[in-house]
Image (spheres, rainbow, N blue to C red):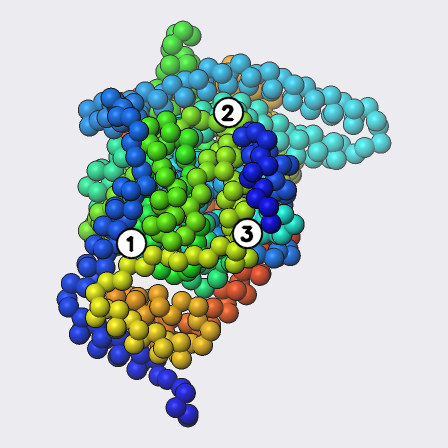
Amino acid sequence: MPSIKSTLPTENCESCPAFYNLEQMGFKVGAFDRVVALAGNPNTGKSTLFNALTGLKQHTGNWPGKTVTRAEGGYQFNGVKYKLVDLPGTYSLLSASQDEEVARDFILFGQPDCTIVVTDATALERNLNLVMQVMEITDRVVVALNLMDEARRKGLEVDARSLSRDLGIPAVPITARTGEGIHTLLATVADLINGEIRTKPLRVGGTPEFQKAVSELVPMIEKLAPGIPNARWLAIRLLDGDSKVQQALLSGELSQRVQQQQQADVQFSRKMSVEGRQ
Amino acid sequence: MTEQTLNPNDVLAKAEALRNNLSSGFRDEIVKSLYSEAETIAKRAVKAAKEKKYDLDQKIDRLVTSPIVGLPIMLVLLGIIIWLTVSGANVFSSAIANVLFGIGDWGRALFESAGFIPWWITGFIWDGVYLGLAWVISVMLPPMAIFFPAFTFLEDLGYLPRVAFNLDWLFKKAGAHGKQSLTMAMGFGCNAAGVVATRVIDSPRERLIAILTNNFVPCNGRFPTLIMLATVFVAATFPPALTSFIAAGTVVGVVLIGVAFTFLMSWILSRTVLKGEASAFTLELPPYRRPNVTRILYTSIIDRTIFVLWRAMQTAAPAGAVIWILANIHMGDTNLARAIADWLNPFGLLLGLDGVILLAYIIAIPANEIVVPTMMMVYMGAGMMIDGPGTSTGIYNLLVNGNGWTMLTAVNLMLFALLHNPCATTIITIYKETKSYKWAAVSVLITLGTAFLVTFLTASFARLMGWA
């Protein structure tokens, strides 16, 4: 596949949906081919990106905590239909508040084909903590370095290549507000889902004894809940004494959860496409 | 039972055993290595190209979140927005009222001249349903069309988190979560949205406090009522040149009373039924962003103005119909509306209000931000036609000369509108968020109880002092 980027006539074309075969599908997400989740710290522009891609008018605001439930919409890129799920903004995936749980449950049990972690390029260090936590759960992660215009204004130079190399996943600089870089982002997501891009997420290992403990637990969890996608992450949570995960395991809820979340997603999408709202 | 099955308890026990074998600090180790890894990676990827001598954002933040001038700046900003609303709304209000009531007269005349339409159809449609809609639009639309864009502008700019930052310490003092300042700020937009926004608070205790007290700040739907009352009554007693400033000052005062009640009730709750310590949190101040004009207009006009107005109209039309029916069921020499209002009157007077206001409040329960338009209809429907309704002089004449209003009535109605129970949407939202009928009921009891108590006290005090 020839690189589309090389045929770019001008930079401005990047922000024009017509140029790169982006069709904003709004709420028409009845039949989609792929599911993409949008995660990120609060106020990094997830909803702005969501609106730019879907053509919806999800309320955006300069205001951490704007989105506390998830919103869904659709877009079509190069003929493939994507369902886009906008998750609440969170700093971590470990605490007990409801917005974090919504985000965590979706990435963990909803099994999106790809998760875009939207980060604030002007405050990268703080944003990376969440990126690394998402990378613990899934391999299919793309980092969107958003707010590049603000970073430039502040005199910051953000090297996406260096970041991408260090993290082992693609990092794409974008400015969701103007549409800059969105084409590259979508192409990257598509390539990652197709397997043309392979990720090697950096995982913080911890001590050797911890590694060993994890590797002992993983097979047990896989046996207990066959088909569970994130046994490694669950093992870490169990070692950490996460009472929610313990309960889910005890009540046999865990394997049900995988099914339920997927079922709920189908129902949710149907409801959204019929009523056009949540 | 085959060997394949595994008891969940075994897995837990295994995890427990493994955890005990690990050195005690392993969790901190992992978190630490995660953070240091993030730091190294970020340092490698980000270069500050040129050292900026100063950061404008930080300078502004130091000013607007300063312990000394932070709060005054906030009040001045609120005052400016409300002043703009008050002085702008006056211009449109009478124009819109003239047009709408003119259409009403024309429609009624048309129906009457047609000859074959019975009087009760004409009355029901034009004096009931249509009048309800006309009142709601002329009272609510002008202030909303100015207030909402201004509010959305501040929101887009990134000012609201600074408000939260300024108020955070007060919430901690009240034993509530600092993030409640965010949900309260959100409540100024819409209380139901504020209740949903409490999901950002992790502790169930503090979240409940935030939910139960959210209604004490006036939402966008209730601002027009406050603005109208402040303009027509409180400011009317001052020289015309000062009117808009006095009105704006009054509304700011009412907002402050609402905030004070939020703190007071949070404090009471956190020391009685919802005991506990306030938990710590970090609040991030987002960078200031240049607001996007199209988005502000879209959000404020479509999402807010049209949405709130449409909601109000859906209640106003049936409310108008009910009032017309009540006013046209005759009992001897009076009608049902009058009779009910008279019956409620002693209780109303006790609160510094009157029977008509209480009747209007009851009829408008589904969306009680329309209590003032409803009240107007009851006054008019009960047989007191006046000239030029919709202009502030017209309203003033109707209420003061026609129905014996005093300053106490106006002040207490503002307090009542500020403190009374949440609208139906908010109550349903509270139920959905808490999954408990009990807490939904408690939210109504707390607010309504406060409203009755406060208006009763102010009325008694004013009478004791001989002011009313």
Residue B155 at x, y percent in the picture: 41, 31
Residues at marks 2 and 1 touching, judged by CB atoms closer than 8 Å: no
Q: Residues within 10 Å of mark 2 (few under 14, many from 20)?
A: few
For the point 33% across and 32% down, the residue is: A156
Q: Residues within 10 Å of mark 1 (few under 14, many from 20)?
A: some
Residue A39 at x, y percent in the picture: 42, 50
The amino acid marked with disc number 1 is: Ser
Q: Closer to the observer: label 2 or label 1?
A: 2
| Horizontal arrangement in the rendering, residue B442 relative to residue A69 (left or right) | left
Residue B17 at x, y percent in the picture: 21, 77
Residue A227 vs residue B81, the one in the foreground: A227
Q: Please give the residue where the numbered disc 1 appears in the rendered image.
A: B203
Secondary structure type for disc 1: loop
Q: Please give the residue where the numbered disc 2 appears in the rendered image.
A: B293
The Cα atoms of the two marked residues, 3 and 2, are separated by 33 Å
Secondary structure type for disc 2: helix
Asked if residue B331 is positioned above or below residue A79 in the image, the reply reads above
Asked if residue B442 is positioned above or below residue B468 in the image, the reply reads below
Specify which label sits upstream in the sequence, 2 or 1.
1
- Res A190 label: 3
The Cα atoms of the two marked residues, 2 and 1, are separated by 37 Å
